[in-house]
Each structure stands twice: as C-alpha cells, then as structure tokens.
C-alpha cells in the first residue's frame, strides 16, 4: 500500500496528499467505489451536500474494512444554506446522511459574496465544531479577502481552502498566501481539462522520464507543491494509479515547466469566486 505524504494546517490538522473525489459517484455503484478506494489505501474522501451522494459515501465508508478513525470524510455547505438557521440544520443533515458521529471536515462550498452571508455560515460551522458535530472546518473557493474577513469577524481561521488548481490554472499567489497562514490547499479538478492537458508535450516528456502516466505526472506536480489533490476515480485501477503518483518525485525544472502551462483564461468555466453564485 502506498504511503502518502501529509500536509499540515496551522492547528496541527493534517491531510494526505491524495484523496478521493466523489462527484458523480452515487447509489450502490458509488458506495462500492468508495469502499474499494478506502480498501486500496485512500484515507480522505471528499463529498458535498450538492453532490447528492452523501448517503452513498457514508455507506461506502461504513462498508470498508478500515478503522473509521483513520478516514477523513469531507462535506460542504451549499450556498442556499448560508443563513445561520439554515446552516445549522444543513450541517446536521449532512452528518445524518453520511451516517457518522461527526463529519471530519466540513467546508463552505462557495462564498457567494453578493449574498454576503458567508460569515453567518462560518459562524454556524464554528458552532458545529464546538458542539462536536464536525471536527475540523474550512472553506472552498474563498479568496484572501474572504479568508481575512472570516478570521477578523470570528477569530477562527480555516484549516483548508479547496480551490480550482491545475497546470492551466496554477494559482501561485493564492498558494503562497495559504502557505504563509498555515491553510492547507486542496485542488478540485486537479487534472483540469484532462483531455487537452494530458496531451501537452511537456506532460508527456516528464511522464516518459519517470515511466508514469500523464495523469500521474500532474498529480505528482500537485504533491511537489504541497497541494492535496482529490481526483475522482470510480474504477479500482484508476484509484490505485492515482495513489501511486504520491511516490513520484519531480525535480525543480520539471515543476517549473509544468507550472508554465498556466494561462490567463485557465479556469475550467466561469467560476471566479468574486462573481460565481452557487445555489
């Protein structure tokens, strides 16, 4: 079984370098995929209220032959549940759907700044943590100004910020900001525009040099930058292949060459946290 590096937040909380993304994994087949992943060595499983699969994820975790205490289960609070009264029951509903005593890591999915309710949502997460409903709390798609406001108004700094990050959108400034403040960076869609990205010449050259796949090359790039990646993989072969990328070591020149693929229009879709609204 691959031994995964871990990255640590300002409060000592740590995440493994590669986790399992579960978007689109639903029902019995989704639960079976989650179970297989955990049995293969995954210890971080990422879900969300809006993925409509917390039940399948919880079932997959429960069916795995691994001590529950070793598994970090993540969910996310949707934009429509930011007001404090909705946020409180939404967090509890996620816990019930997952079938766990406490959610290991709960994030705010998007800041939805035009609604200006994300501080309320954060306060509800702080309260849930104090009540033991969740163990660790963080955010997703938050910009530095959003993060600073949360800490200024509540005194609590997130342990994680899950953001869009891949070679077409390397997020160097935001990544440096997180490092300075002990916030773990997680990358959603870590393979970006996979069909296009994995055909890039530089990715192929690095992959050939290490005898690995193009996807493993990109995941190794994330690991080298101390970014937690959460690629979705439903098949056991892909799950194992992704985990194996954690043991690959890229040199500085290879990292720089891959990072240079960044583009001004590198986002996957119009998902600028300054303007994007999640329901």
Image (cartoon, grey):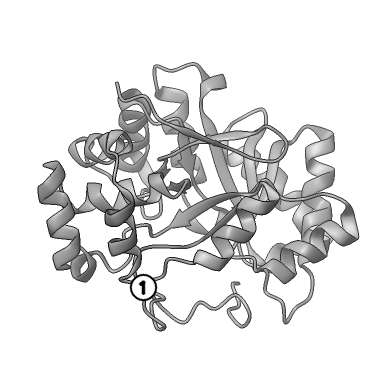
Quarter of the C terminus within the rendering: bottom right
In the image, is 184 to the left or to the right of 250? right
Q: Residues within 10 Å of mark 1 (few under 14, many from 20)?
A: some
Look at 36% across and 49% down and name the residue there. 25
Q: Residue 191 appears at what percent x and percent y?
A: 31, 59
Look at 63% across and 60% down and name the residue there. 177
In the image, is 235 to the left or to the right of 135? left
Asked which secondary structure carries label 1, the reply is: loop
Q: Residue 246 appears at what percent x and percent y?
A: 33, 37
Please name whichever residue, 33 or 225, is drawn nearer the observer in this view of the structure: 225
Q: Residue 142 appears at what percent x and percent y?
A: 64, 65
Pointer 1 residue: 262
Look at 39% across and 44% down and name the residue there. 223
Quarter of the N terminus within the rendering: top left
Residue 199 can be seen in this image? no
Look at 74% across and 36% down and name the residue there. 133
Residue 47 can be seen in this image? yes
In the image, is 169 to the left or to the right of 234? right
Q: Residue 117 appears at what percent x and percent y?
A: 79, 70
Q: In this view, does 6 lie above or below 126?
A: above
Q: In this view, does 39 lie above or below 224?
A: above
| Residue ranking furthest to the front | 253
Examine the image and state in which quarter residue 154 appears. bottom right
Q: Is residue 255 above or below residue 263?
A: above
């Amino acid at each position: 079984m691959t031994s995964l590096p871990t990255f640590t937040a300002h409060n000592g909380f740590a995440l493994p370098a590669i986790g399992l993304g579960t978007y689109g994994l639903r029902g019995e087949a989704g639960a079976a995929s989650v179970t297989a992943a955990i049995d293969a060595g995954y210890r971080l499983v990422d879900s969300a209220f809006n993925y409509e699969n917390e039940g399948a994820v919880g079932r997959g975790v429960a069916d795995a032959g691994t001590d529950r205490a070793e598994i970090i289960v993540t969910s996310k609070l949707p934009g429509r549940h930011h007001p404090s009264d909705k946020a409180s029951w939404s967090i509890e509903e996620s816990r019930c759907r997952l079938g766990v005593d406490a959610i290991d890591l709960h994030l705010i999915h998007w800041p939805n700044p035009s609604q200006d309710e994300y501080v309320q949502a954060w306060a509800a997460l702080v309260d849930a943590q104090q009540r033991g409903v969740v163990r660790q709390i963080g955010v997703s798609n938050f910009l530095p100004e959003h993060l600073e406001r949360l800490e200024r108004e509540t005194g609590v700094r997130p342990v994680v910020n899950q953001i869009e990050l891949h070679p077409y959108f390397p997020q160097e400034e935001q990544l440096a900001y997180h490092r300075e403040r002990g916030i773990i960076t997680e990358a959603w869609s870590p393979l970006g525009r996979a069909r296009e990205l994995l055909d890039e010449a530089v990715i192929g050259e690095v992959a050939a040099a290490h005898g690995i796949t193009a996807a493993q090359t990109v995941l190794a790039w994330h690991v080298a930058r101390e970014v937690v990646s959460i690629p979705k993989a439903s098949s056991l072969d892909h799950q194992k292949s992704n985990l194996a990328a954690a043991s690959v070591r890229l040199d500085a020149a290879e990292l720089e060459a891959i990072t240079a693929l960044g583009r001004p229009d590198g986002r996957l879709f119009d998902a600028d946290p300054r303007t994007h609204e999640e329901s």
